Amino acid sequence: MNKIHVKLFDCLELGDDVPTVVMGVINLSPESFYKNSVLTTPEDLKNAINTMIQNGAKILDVGARSTAPWSEKITVKEEIARIIPALEITCEQVPKNIIISVDTQYKEVAQKAHEIVSSHEKKMILNDVSCFKTDPDLMNFILKTEIPAIIMASKKDPGDLLKMKDIIAEFKKTLKQLKNKGHDTNKIILDPGIGHWVEKKIYTCDLKIINELLRLKRLHKPILVAISRKSFIGEILQLPDPRDRLNGTLSATAIAVYNGAHIIRTHDVNSQLFEIIKVAEELRRQK
């Protein structure tokens, strides 16, 4: 199997033979499942940004809408009202070698975010957990702007695919669609969609996806894994409160990196995380 190596920007390389990239979560959604991660004031936001960058994050994922299926829904207008002021602060705080990821399923949000990020001469990635299903026009946005995008495996609703064979099949369809429309699919990052996104997606589905990550490499795209403090860890450890799931998160992260993840999306950017990543990378190299 060919090794994966992609240079998205001068300051961002992803692949099998480069260090795993850490993406820090900038959470602006009070509806979030992990309340301790929610940033409610500009000062909190600035402190989180500075800490994550100092601790080694290369990407900051800014999101203003909880994607948990049971969360209270907000309007696109409310999402914009939350995310635009935060993006202004983020752009002012981050150096040019830090990538800003915008976590949204809507073209209107992405467009306004892109205007802000571009005006500050910073670099942006789109992170769409619906794989262009919530707002199909979002695909036209990335075709027009040619920005890189993270797409999460989804058939009708975010994260509704349970098995790796179905995840791969849906990714193939989306990648073919993008290619046929003229998009450079080397700018696409794949997220298999770990988490309790739909009722029928029980925790063993997540375990199988993590165990089978290597199968995703046949699509020759970088792989992002978002497992931070998620419910499958709570199920295994009988820990209903996400605040108690750090050790389980680190354990699952090590296995995900060993199995081929190139980006780890996390609430906790710290030395513990980088140590477990480094050991997992070395074990993977010695396979």
Image: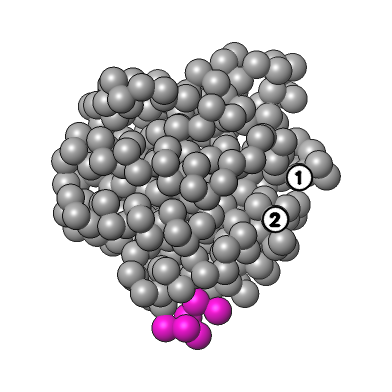
Q: Are marks 2 and 1 in contact (CB under 8 Å)?
A: yes
Label 2 vs label 1: CA separation? Answer: 8 Å
Residue numbers of the magenta segment:
177-182
Q: Quadrant of residue 115?
A: bottom left
Q: Residue at x 61, y 20 (%)?
A: 242
Residue 226 at x, y = what percent?
Answer: 53, 40
Q: Nearer the viewer, residue 178 or 66?
A: 66
- The answer to whether residue 276 is visible is no
Q: Residue flagged by tag 1: what amino acid is it?
A: Val
Q: Residue at x 37, y 48 (%)?
A: 101
Residue 36 at x, y = what percent?
Answer: 50, 18
Q: Earlier in the sequence, mark 2 or mark 1?
A: 2
On whether residue 45 falls in the magenta region, the answer is no
Q: Which mark is residue 198?
A: 1
Q: Which mark is residue 157?
A: 2
Q: Nearer the viewer, residue 182 or 277?
A: 182
Q: Residue flagged by tag 2: what amino acid is it?
A: Asp
Residue 284 at x, y = what percent?
Answer: 46, 43
Number of numbered discs on residues:
2
Q: Nearer the viewer, residue 66 or 9?
A: 66
Q: Which mark is residue 232?
A: none
Magenta-colored segment: predominant secondary structure: helix
Q: Residue at x 41, y 23 (%)?
A: 40
